[in-house]
Amino acid sequence: MIPIRPTFATLVQGTLMGGALGDAFGYLVEFDSLADIAAKYGPSGLVDLSQSGAPAHFSDDTQMTLYTLDGLLDVLEWANDGVGADVNACQWLAYLRWLKTQGVPAPSHAPEQPPRWIDAQSVLHHQRHPGNACITGLATGEMGTVARPVNPDSKGCGTVMRSAPYGLLPNVDAETVYKMSSDAASLTHGHPAARQSSGAFSWLIHRLVIDGLPLREAAVSARDRAAAEPAADPELMARLDAALALSAPPLGTHDGAPLSGDSLTDALGLGWVAEEALAVALYCVLATEASSVSPVEHFLAAIRLAANHSGDSDSTASIAGNILGALYGEAALPPSWMTMAEAPQLVRHLGAEFIKLTTGQ
Ligand SMILES: [Mg+2]
C-alpha cells in the first residue's frame, strides 16, 4: 500500500497546534524539578493534559511562534500586492508588537507598525514567563543583526522555540529558510548557537513538511546543515550528534526504553539554551518513533518524555510538538487534548491565513 502523504494544510496546522499542545503540557511543570513533578503528579509524573485540573494555558513559546507566523503573513500579504518586503524587518516589527503585548514599551526611536489582527487577541497579552533576552533585545529598539548583535552572549532557547513557522514556507528552498530563521534569531540573541540552532530547527521542519522526508533522514539533514556552517558552534554539534546517536535503534538503555528524566538531561542538557532545547526535543521524537503504532501514540510518548525532566519543559515539549505535527499533520494531535487546548480557533485562524496566502486556497 502506498502511504498517503498528509496535505500541506494539515501539516501546517499540525505543526502549529502540536507545538501549542506540547507547550501547554510542558508549561505545567516548566520550573519544576523531577522531584517536584513526582510530588505534584505522582511517580509516573505528568502523563496527561487533564492532570492540570484547570484550563491548559500555552506559554510565551506559542505566543511568540504565532507572532513569527504573523511576521510571515505580513511578508506574504506584501508579496501578493507585488511588493517584496524585507523578511527580517517584518519579523522585527512583529516581535516589537509582541513586546507591547507583554506590557513593555519600545523606545521612541523604534519603528511602530499599525496594529494587526493578532494584536487584538487578548489571550496573547497574558504574561506567560517571556524570555529575558527576547524582552531586553527588543526593548533596545535596535534591530539586532549578525554583524551588530543585541545580547551578544545570549543563546537562550527563546529563538528556537519560536522558529517553526519559517519551515512551513512552500516555494522557498531550505537554505533560504535557514537564513530567515537564523537572521531572526539575531533580533534578540547574539550568540552563534542561538542563530544556528534556530536555523537547523526551521530547516528540519521544512524538510519534513515541504520535502516529506522521513523523520530520521530529516534530522540527519538538519545536523548536516548545522555542520556546514563555516563556524559551526561546537556545543550545537555535540548536542545534535548525541541526540542522533543515542536515539538510534536499538536504544542503548538497559531495558530498551528511551532515556528519560535525569538521564535524558544529563546526556543532552536541561534545554534552557537553544542547542540543548533542540537536542532534547529531537531526541524525544526520534527515540519514541519505533515503539509507537500511531501518530497520536508517538505524540504522547514523545511529549511525555520531553516534559518530564528538571529543565525547560515547555520549550522542549513545544519544539517536540512542532516536529511531530510537521511529521504527521493534525493526525498527531490527541483528540482529548484538543478539547482542553487554549484558543485552538486562534491558532487555526492564523494557520488558515498562512495556507491561503501561500497556496491561494
Ligand atoms: Mg515558555
Image: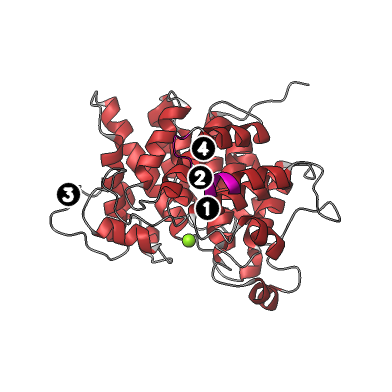
Q: Secondary structure at mark 2?
A: helix
Viewer-nearest of labels 3 and 2? 3
- Magenta extent: 229-239
Visible in this render: residue 288? no
Residue 100 on the magenta span:
no
Q: Earlier in the sequence, mark 1 or mark 4?
A: 1
Mark 1 Cβ inside 8 Å of ligand 1: no
Residue 153 location (% of width, % of height) = 37, 57
- State the image quarter where residue 39 is shown: bottom right
- State the image quarter where residue 353 is shown: top left
Q: Earlier in the sequence, mark 3 or mark 1?
A: 1
Identify whether 280 is placed above or below 203: below
Q: What separation in Å lies between label 1 and label 2 (alpha carbons)?
A: 6 Å
Give amino acid for label 2. Leu
Residue shown at the point (69%, 63%) measured from the top left: 261
Residue for badge 3: 111
Residue shown at the point (45%, 25%) measured from the top left: 173
Q: What separation in Å lies between label 4 and label 2 (alpha carbons)?
A: 23 Å
| Label at residue 226 | 4
Q: What separation in Å lies between label 1 and label 4 (alpha carbons)?
A: 26 Å
